[in-house]
Amino acid sequence: MKTILCSSYRVCSPLVLPSWYTSVGVETNFYYDRRNARESQRRKFHQSREYHGQSRNSKNNLELSRLGGTIGALTIAGYLAWKKSTSNVAQLDAKKTPHETGKHDQVLKHLPHFSRNQVAEHYDDSRRIWVSFRRGVYDVTEFVAVHPGGSRILMAAGGSLEPFWELYPVHQKSDVFQILEKYRIGNLNEEDVVEAQEAVDHFKGEPMRHPALIRRADKPFNGETPPSLLTEKFHTPNDVFYVRNHLPVPQVDAKTYRLEIDGINLTETTFSLQDIKKFPKVSISATIQCGGNRRTEMGKDKVVAGLGWTGGAIGNAKWTGARLVDVLRSAGFKPEAYKHAKQLHVKFDGLDTDQSGECYGASVPLSYLLDGNFDAILAYEMNDKPIPIDHGFPVRIVLPGIVGARSVKWLSRVSISEEESQSPWQQRDYKVFSPSVSLETVDFSAAPPIMDTPVTSYICSHNNGDKVKKGPVKLQGYAFSGGGRGIVRVEISLDKGKTWNVARISDTANLESTKNWSWVLWEANVNIQANAEIWVKAVDSGYNQQPEDFNNIWNYRGLLSTAYHKIYLEAR
């Protein structure tokens, strides 16, 4: 019997909102027609999913017993450097106020009052789109066109935002409230104001995370590796590998897990985890990097929207599993059958879903798979261990050289289609626009989704403002370029680019790949006799180099932040 893993309707869900921005939302009748069937399917599937066949509590206890292992394997120096670094970055995400008060909690006397019934009449743009939030009533009609979550804004039309923002507490902070207040048109009648109820906690019982991870958001959890730990090992230990979640972590039973394959010129086929493990087992060493890595540097002089990543939203691992093309071939995949591959896409759906059952999704052009040197892996192991829950247990797609947003975790479906994934993370998020474009002026269709990532480098051993003794100083860091391009050179300057010293680069580990999917770790001994500004830049095998500053690559989302990394060291 076929297992339904995700809704067959591939429309933008109105419920899943980008975790980096506000979401004022509404729901149209389009969704009502399909929701009952979709909800029934989702409930049946979720009821069958258990956490590795164990209770979540027993798994958490197991995770707790392992938490100390990774740090113990790393050097004391690295740990102490991390402790020092946390004092510099902890304040980046200090605005975590789940029930922060503001004008939305106030009655504005110069504005009219409306009842809940009056708000409910405004559920589409023919009548204007209204929503309520605590004591405020808002007309968000004009915001719909620029909402980063796309049609997900069509969610709470004629109703309250509160139950939906419980799923995304990141919205409940002052800057989001300020944006919402721009659309305020009135007050909600006092008798209709319902204080926020204790909602279902969609994040209850999530896996334990290593205490060394620097938390950038709690719900959904997002945490980066302390940069000082990144140079300790070529393969980043699983427990401290950065975590980027967009939705609650799903509970998946490996025994009942199924992966669905379908699409153009394919026979619809379902695979269990054991089926996938029957294919030839291959390993690649590959770096996965969040598109927002180093965002805080880009936002130093001009505000950007997104999680406050420093340089730790990146990691390198040994990924083991079955080649995607091998699994597709068993479903009828024949490269010669796709003469117009440039117009086709490979779509990936995850098991992480919102309240309506719609899932995280992404896609890449089919032409990637037709490149015999592209190593797309259905990974079930990470660094020779079963892939951890936060990283996609039991199976994730690993698309090396491509921005991490496309390597979908908890993979449920792969399909070949004439259209891209309609997920907002494909259609609106993870796109880069001109420095002159803002959220108010953006045309999301004007830019393609990020695929290959540009060359970047980072100093991990020291933080901006560190004090060092005069004399020899050992600098360490990483460099990486997407698209399978290797790093041919890393250079250090102590005089703002007048002269450069070439750093030593570690060996790479391509394993079974013909491309360079991994970062390099580098080190350089420099002589510091006075206060100095240290610059680092990398050159990849295509002789692409990083830009000197962020002026010409700035974008309002703070993506692909790849300018020279610069830190100031004080000599003493």
Image (tube, rainbow, N blue to C red):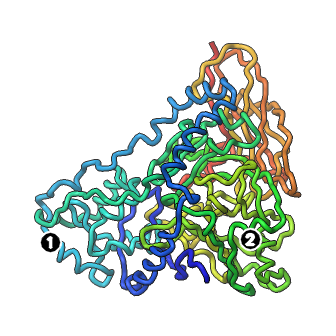
Front position in the image: 397 or 461: 397
Q: Position of residue 17 (x, y in %)?
A: 45, 64
Picture quadrant of residue 435: bottom right
Residue 535, disc:
none
- The N terminus: image quadrant: bottom right
- Asked whether the viewer can see residue 566, the reply is no
Q: Is residue 90 left or right of residue 432?
A: left
Marks 1 and 2, the one that precedes in the sequence: 1
Q: Residue, x 67% and y 74% (percent of image)?
A: 414
Q: Amino acid at mark 2?
A: Asp
Location of mark 2 (residue): 275
Secondary structure, mark 2, is helix
Q: Position of residue 67 (x, y in %)?
A: 58, 38
Location of mark 1 (residue): 115
Q: Amino acid at mark 1?
A: Ser
Task: Estimate how packed mark 2 is, as few (under 14), some (14 to 19) or many (20 or more) residues with alpha carbons within 10 Å.
Answer: few
Front position in the image: 309 or 556: 309
- Asked whether the viewer can see residue 186, the reply is yes
Q: Position of residue 334 (x, y in %)?
A: 83, 82
Secondary structure, mark 1, is loop
Task: Estimate how packed mark 1 is, as few (under 14), some (14 to 19) or many (20 or more) residues with alpha carbons within 10 Å.
Answer: some
Q: Residue, x 83% and y 59% (percent of image)?
A: 282
Q: Is residue 7 above or below residue 550?
A: below
Q: Is residue 461 above or below residue 452?
A: above
